[in-house]
Amino acid sequence: MESFEQEEEKRKIRVEKPDGEIEYIDLPTTLYATPILHRILGQDVLEGIEEVYKEIKDVLQNTTNPPMNLESFELAFMGDVDPVASLAKWEKIVRVYKKAQQHMSSDLESRSTTYSVLLYHSMGSLLETEKGQEGVKLLMKLYDESE
């Protein structure tokens, strides 16, 4: 999966414009605040967010710029159009992340790569060159087969 990190700088997000035209824009490497759409999240959503955060805390604190704490993670959900659906996607990422750890190295770099691949795959943002890599194929399969 070494080339995954090498491709990181070239990462693009596929955006469909209102007229149907497809555009690829650079994925930001720095996290930015999003507008708050939901000032209050339900207790069950907040508890779910905290559980997800606990599972990937070390990755979020060591690989995001700036390091993401629980409050920042919660704020991201407050900016989602549908925080409940977003939480379900994150819970799926974490389930697969934990399952994948049984098959992969447990060092921070490997965990970060696993997290990144799962996140980008969940958004449909993996590059075609990455999709052909064996480790990425395994993660995509685990994610796609997960409930």
Image (cartoon, rainbow, N blue to C red):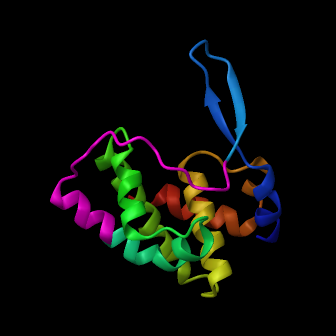
* Quadrant of residue 46 within the rendered picture: bottom left
Residue 30 appears in the rendering: yes
Q: Where is residue 138 in the image (x, y as percent from the top left)?
A: 63, 66
Q: Which residue is drawn at 67% across and 62% down?
A: 137
**Residue 17 within the magenta-colored segment of the rendering:** no
The front one of 122 and 53 is 53
Rendered-image quadrant of the N terminus: bottom right
The front one of 54 and 142 is 54
| Residues drawn in magenta | 28-50
Q: In this view, does 54 lie to the left or right of 38?
A: right
Residue 91 appears in the rendering: no
**Residue 40 within the magenta-colored segment of the rendering:** yes
Q: Residue at x 55, y 58 (%)?
A: 119
Q: In this view, does 95 lie to the left or right of 63?
A: left
Q: Which residue is drawn at 60% across and 87% down?
A: 106
Q: Residue at x 68, y 51 (%)?
A: 126
Magenta highlight: main SS: loop
Most extreme residue toward the bottom is 106
